[in-house]
Amino acid sequence: MKIIGTGSSLPKKVVTNDMLSTFLDTSDEWIVTRTGISSRKVISDERLEDLAVDAARKAIEDAGITLDEIDIIICSNVVNEFVTPGLSCVIQRDLGTKVPTMDLNAACAGFIYGLDFAHGYSMVHKDVRNILLVCAEEPTRMMNWADRNVCVLFGDGAAAVVLDCTDKENDCIKEVKLSGVPAVESLYYKRNLEPTPFITKEKEPVPITMNGRDIFRMATRAAFADITAVFEKAGITAEDIDYFLLHQANIRIIESIQNHFGISPEKFLHNIEHLGNTSSASVPILMDEMNRCGRLKKGQKLIMSAFGAGFVSGAAYVVWDK
Ligand code: UT7
C-alpha cells in the first residue's frame, strides 16, 4: 500500500492570539511561549462535511485517479453535527459515490489508526484498489470558550489521503505501533443526549475538560516509546529518517521528542504556528502542505506520530513513494 494523493481544506476564519485576549485572560506572549501557536483557523459558516469533501476531491485529483476507483471510505472524526450516520456516509453522499464507508474515533491519533486499519483491510481484501482516508475535525465546537486552558489550543480542518493497494510488491507502510493506556479523566468531552421518560440520572453535559500537564507528560512518553518501537521493528534509527511529522499539539512536545532523539530541528516539520491542534487532521494536513510545496521526495523515510484522548497513541514508519 502507498500514499498516492493528499488534500486538505481549512476554514477561512483566522483567529489570532490577540483576538482571543479580547475576551480571555490570556496573551499572545503566553500562548506562543507555552504552545508555539500564533493563530488558528476556526469554522464559522462552513460545514465540516464540505471541508472533508473538498480535501477528498483534492486528494483524488492529486492521486491522478477517478472517484470510481475508490473502493472504501474511512473517516476519522471526533465530533460533527451528525451523530448518525457516520461522517463517512455524509462524505460519500456529497462526493456522489456508492462504496462501503466507516468512521473511526481514535481522537487526535485517528490518522495513524486509520492508516493501520486501511493497511490491514487491504491485506485481507486483495481486490481493493484504492482507499480514501479522510480526517475531518471541528474541535472548536467541543469547548468552553471561556476556558483559557483549552480553547487557545485548537483549530479546525480536514485532510485526506488516497491509499493505493494494488502494488503488493511495494508496501510503503513499513511499520506501525499503536498503544493505549486508560486515562479517560485526563481529557474528555461529554455531549448532551435527549431526555427520555425513564431517565433518572442528572444531565451532565461537559465541554472539553483537560489536565494539560498529564496529557503533556503522557504525550512525550508515548511518542518516544511508539517511535522507538517502530525503529526497533524496522531495524532503523532516528538518523535514517528524513522527516518527522508529529501531531501538532504543542511545539514544546515536538521539541521534547526531538531532544530525546538528538536529531536536528529541521527534520521536525510543523505548522502549529498558524493552525493549532486540528486533532486527527493535523498530521495529514502537514503532509499535504509538504507534498504540495515539493518538500516530500520519492524514497524519503518519514515517521508520523500522534496521540490523543483515551489515552491513545501511535507511530508509523512510511517510505514516500509518489
Ligand atoms: O491532542 C491532545 C490535546 N492536548 C494537549 O496536547 C495538551 C498538552 N498540554 C499542553 O500543551 C500544556 O500543558 C498546556 C499548553 C495546556 C499548558 O501549558 P503548561 O506549561 O503545562 O501550563 P500550566 O497548565 O502548568 O499552567 C501554568 C499557568 C497556570 O496559572 P497558575 O496556576 O500558575 O497561576 C494557568 O492557569 O498558566 C495559566 N494558564 C494560562 N495563562 C494565560 C493556562 N492557560 C493559560 C492561557 N493564558 N491561555
Image (cartoon, rainbow, N blue to C red):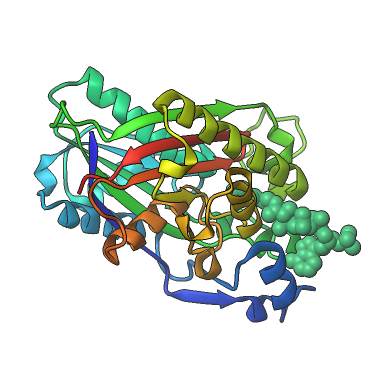
The correct choice, above or below, for 275 with respect to 166 in the image is below
Residue 230 percent location from the top left of the image: 46, 30
Q: Please give the name of the residue rendered at 42% of the width and 74% of the height, measured from the top-left corner.
A: 12
Using the image as rendered, state which of residue 315 and residue 48 is in the foreground. 315
Number of marks: 0
Residue 190 percent location from the top left of the image: 65, 42
Instruction: Describe residue 127's horizontal placement relative to residue 47 as left or right.
Output: left
Q: As drawn, which residue projects farthest toward the top?
A: 124
The correct choice, above or below, for 178 with respect to 63 in the image is above
Using the image as rendered, state which of residue 220 and residue 261 is in the foreground. 261
Residue 195 percent location from the top left of the image: 64, 38
Q: Is residue 81 visible?
A: no
The correct choice, above or below, for 287 with respect to 293 in the image is above
Quadrant (top left, top right, bottom left, bottom right) of the N terminus: top left
Residue 294 percent location from the top left of the image: 27, 63
Instruction: Describe residue 298's horizontal placement relative to residue 129 as left or right.
Output: right
- The quarter of the rendering in which ligand 1 is drawn is bottom right
Quarter location, residue 150: bottom right
Q: Please give the name of the residue rendered at 48% of the width and 66% of the height, measured from the top-left corner.
A: 43
Using the image as rendered, state which of residue 174 and residue 142 is in the foreground. 174
Quarter location, residue 233: top left
Q: As drawn, which residue projects farthest toward the right?
A: 25
Q: Please give the name of the residue rendered at 58% of the width and 50% of the height, measured from the top-left corner.
A: 258
Instruction: Describe residue 317's horizontal placement relative to residue 187 as left or right.
Output: left
Q: Is residue 14 visible?
A: yes
